[in-house]
Structures are given as C-alpha cells and as structure tokens.
Image (spheres, rainbow, N blue to C red):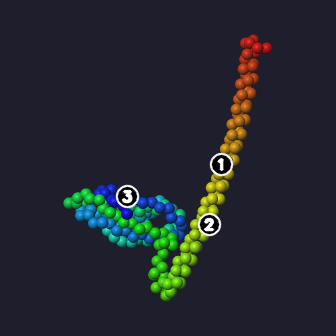
C-alpha cells in the first residue's frame, strides 16, 4: 500500500525470472476529480498491461525472459477536482504464489490433500530452480573474480617491470650526466 498524490507517478520495479506467472490485484481509493492510470512494462518498454481510470482489478502475464518489470500508477487531475492523496493497494505475486490451486482443484477434480501435495511439489520445484540459478550465478561470479584477479596480477607485474626499467634508466642517465659534467669519476 502507498499514497499517490495528485498529478504524480509512482512506479514499483521487480526482477523476475524467465517463464514465471505474474499476477497482480490492485485497488485505488476514490477521489473526486482524479483519474489514475495503471501501466505495466518491461525494461525494453514493451507494454504488458494498461488500464485507464483504474480503480480496482487484476492483471496477469507470463514472463518471456529474465527482466526488470515496472508497475506504474499515474494520477491526473480533471476539471473540478481537488487534490487529495489516493491510497493504492497492490498485491503482486509471481511464481508458485501466483498459481491458483483452487481453480486447478476444480478443473482436475482434486481432493484437498492432492491440491496441497501439488502445491508442495510446485514449491519444491521452484526451490530447486532457484538453487540451480544461484549455483549458475555463483559460477559466473567466481569466473569473473578469477579473471579479474589474473588481470590485476599481470598488470602489477607489468607495472613493477616498468618501474624497475625506469629506475635503471634514470640511474644510468644521471651517472652519464654527472660524468660529463665531471662531478663524479
């Protein structure tokens, strides 16, 4: 829940994995002379859901790739309206949370215990997928860390060689200079 002032826009962002069901329930409190628009987009600007003069409703979509999704509420004043804040209630669910097991039970004529087992099975699959994703990310991060480490090591060795070379050149140059000015022998 959050408050939306007149003529303002508030957006909520969330990263969601590929092939996940996303559902949202929203309700906007009444305010005379104000209209609230709802827009759901991804990071590339694709419009997933749009509703003008949104007061109460639901939306759902399935993600096609891992992306950042944005839910925006924009309040606009109309003629004769007065500026009061509106309360916006938003319940956003994705993955296993978004699945409606009541509808599944009716469609497949499942008993309550079977529905609960199906829910637990989906939850365990979701946990396994999350762990596989975390393992993949950990491997990528480890590879990046090792690559950075080797680059820094080679750069530091190169820097040390440059410093030793410059120091040697400076000593030889100054020695030759002082010999030419007959300050040392």
Q: Is residue 133 left or right of residue 48?
A: right
User: Residue 109: x, y in percent?
Assistant: 49, 87
The residue that mark 2 highlights is 132
The structure residue drawn at horizontal position 73% and vertical position 31%, both measured from the top left corner, is 165
Q: Residue 14 location, x and y as percent?
A: 47, 61
Q: Which mark is residue 148?
A: 1
Image quadrant for the N terminus?
A: bottom left
Q: Residue at x 33, y 59 (%)?
A: 4
Cα separation between marks 2 and 3: 34 Å
Give whichever of 119, 103 is nearer the camera: 119
Residue placed under numbered mark 3 in the picture: 10
The secondary structure type at the circle numbered 2 is: helix
Which of the 4 quarters of the picture holds residue 33?
bottom left
Label 1 and label 2: CA atoms lie apart by: 24 Å
In the image, taking residue 100 as reference, residue 6 lies left or right, namely left
Q: Dot 1: what SS?
A: helix
């Amino acid at each position: 829940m959050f408050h939306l002032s007149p003529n303002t826009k508030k957006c909520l962002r969330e990263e969601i994995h590929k092939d996940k069901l996303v559902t949202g329930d929203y309700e906007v409190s009444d305010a005379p002379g104000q209209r609230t628009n709802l827009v759901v987009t991804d990071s590339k600007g694709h419009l997933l859901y749009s509703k003008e003069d949104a007061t109460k409703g639901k939306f759902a979509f399935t993600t096609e790739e891992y992306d950042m999704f944005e839910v925006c509420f924009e309040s606009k004043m109309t003629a004769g309206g007065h500026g009061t804040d509106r309360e916006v209630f938003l319940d956003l669910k994705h993955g296993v949370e978004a699945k409606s097991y009541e509808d599944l039970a009716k469609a497949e004529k499942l008993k309550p215990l079977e529905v609960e087992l199906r829910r637990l099975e989906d939850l365990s699959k979701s946990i396994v997928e999350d762990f596989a994703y975390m393992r993949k990310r950990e491997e990528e991060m480890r590879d990046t860390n090792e690559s950075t480490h080797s680059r820094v090591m080679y750069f530091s060795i190169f820097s040390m060689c440059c410093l030793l070379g410059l120091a040697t050149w400076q000593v030889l140059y100054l020695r030759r200079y002082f010999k030419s000015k007959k300050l040392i022998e």
